[in-house]
Image (cartoon, helix red, strand yellow):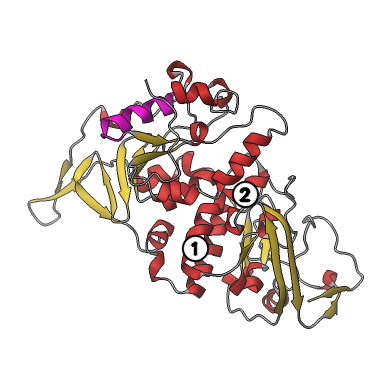
């Protein structure tokens, strides 16, 4: 029977697999490691009380000839009571190690097609129940004879499987894919392999599809080719998509990015505070909250870790960085950029952050400015030519924290930097 294994501090060259999966709403029904059952778990895992996905992952790991599998629910002490000190201390340490767990795994087993850990990895695949062949159509030509056309069957596409999966719509699992060297996806319709070279599906084991060179996955797999400016711009572009991901605990928004932050920091070697990089502080402050009808988590994060209001991570909804839209020039100087964190700064466990800027001030009556943003779904599509010119001149001259679309800005001037 499998058991929980805790390696010694000097253990080296241990080959293992890692599991990437969605817990789901029924995760409370399954056994997880806690401070009270740790000794029992080290002796033997209660097989029948493990989730189906974890059971399947253990079977696959053994089938691949590997002895070890890293699973967050089993390898990190989980919360079993309010103010669980042992859980919080262990979680704080482990959150800083997420990058290494997925980067160093021989491969990651991904439950890409499962919305819950109760479903398992071996899903029914209707598309594999039959093998459709090409259809040849003969059309009579206008002049003489026949013209032949061939219609190829549509097979499940790995990219679509990933894009439409519940797994990759979760904040925590987004970084797990980027950090993994090799991924064995158990999708809703097929099993497929993904690595830095490309994709291959069980439906076409002889066909290798390379990664698209504009994809995030390709960029992060080739992160060593980026200069610092390009790398931090890649980070902010990634954050935009990341802000759309689902997350259960708002305070986890930065920790769930800790692995990617660690990866970027090894390349650019600069200070990182609350989701913002030291060399691109001004750009990192140009974020705005895009309030859309399909985003229900919009609003400030309620957390025991108080995030600074100037950080994009303080808003629990879809955000956008305006410097990515058109020419950009910063007129501010950063005087103070400091934080205190529980663990490394890249862990995202911010306890305190301070930012002091120097620049020109101006009194501005914000109510007189056109604040229409071209990517805001609530913006009116109809406008006069003069209004369009005004928008081009003033767009995003001011974006106020916490102001709702219907809330008036007031007519009195405000001090703006």
Percent of width and height locating residue 24: 54, 30
Q: Is residue 377 above or below residue 151?
A: below
Choose the circle earlier in sequence order: 2 or 1. 2
The quadrant in which residue 414 appears is: bottom right
Whether residue 384 sits left or right of residue 208 in the image: it is right
Percent of width and height locating residue 221: 38, 59
Which residue sits furthest right? 412
Highlighted range, magenta = 51-66
Pick the front one: 376 or 43: 43
Q: Is residue 26 above or below residue 348?
A: above
- Report helix, strand or loop for mark 1: helix
Whether residue 77 sits left or right of residue 180 in the image: it is right
Q: Which residue in the structure is indicated by mark 2?
A: 253
The quadrant in which residue 66 appears is: top left
Q: Which residue in the structure is indicated by mark 1?
A: 264
Whether residue 286 sits left or right of residue 173 in the image: it is right
């Amino acid at each position: 029977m499998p058991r929980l294994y805790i390696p010694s501090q000097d253990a080296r060259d241990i080959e293992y697999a890692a599991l990437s999966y969605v817990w789901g709403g029924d995760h409370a029904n399954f056994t997880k490691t806690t401070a009270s059952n740790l000794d029992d778990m080290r002796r033997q895992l209660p097989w029948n009380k493990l989730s189906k996905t974890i059971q399947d992952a253990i079977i696959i790991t053994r089938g691949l000839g590997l002895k070890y599998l890293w699973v967050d629910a089993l390898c990190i002490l989980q919360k079993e009571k309010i103010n669980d000190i042992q859980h919080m201390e262990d979680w704080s340490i482990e959150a800083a190690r997420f990058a290494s767990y997925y980067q160093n795994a021989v491969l990651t087993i991904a439950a890409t097609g499962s919305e819950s850990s109760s479903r398992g990895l071996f899903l029914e695949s209707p598309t594999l129940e039959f093998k459709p062949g090409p259809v040849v159509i003969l059309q009579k030509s206008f002049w003489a004879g026949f013209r032949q056309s061939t219609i190829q069957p549509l097979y499940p596409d790995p990219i679509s499987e990933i894009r439409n999966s519940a797994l990759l719509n979760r904040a925590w699992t987004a970084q797990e894919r980027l950090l993994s060297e090799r991924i064995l996806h158990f999708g809703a319709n097929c099993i497929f392999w993904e690595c830095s070279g490309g994709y291959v599906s069980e439906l076409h084991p002889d066909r290798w599809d390379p990664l698209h060179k504009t994809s995030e996955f390709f960029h992060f797999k080739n992160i060593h080719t980026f200069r610092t400016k390009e790398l931090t711009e890649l980070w902010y572009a990634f954050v935009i998509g990341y802000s759309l991901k689902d997350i259960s605990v708002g305070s986890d928004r930065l920790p769930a990015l800790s692995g990617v932050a660690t990866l970027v920091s090894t390349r650019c070697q600069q200070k990182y505070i609350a989701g913002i990089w030291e060399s691109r502080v001004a750009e990192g402050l140009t974020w705005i909250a895009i309030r859309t009808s399909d985003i229900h988590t919009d609003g400030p994060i309620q957390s025991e870790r108080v995030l600074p209001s100037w950080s994009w991570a303080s808003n629990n909804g879809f955000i956008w960085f305006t410097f990515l839209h058109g020419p950009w020039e910063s007129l501010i100087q950063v005087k103070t950029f400091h934080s205190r964190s529980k663990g490394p700064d890249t862990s995202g466990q911010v306890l305190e952050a301070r930012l002091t800027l120097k620049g020109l001030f101006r009194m501005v009556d914000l109510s007189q400015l056109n604040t229409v943003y071209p990517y805001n779904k609530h913006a009116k599509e109809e406008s006069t030519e003069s209004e369009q010119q005004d928008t081009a001149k003033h767009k995003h001259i001011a974006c106020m924290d916490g102001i709702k679309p219907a809330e008036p800005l007031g007519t009195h001037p405000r001090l703006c930097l």
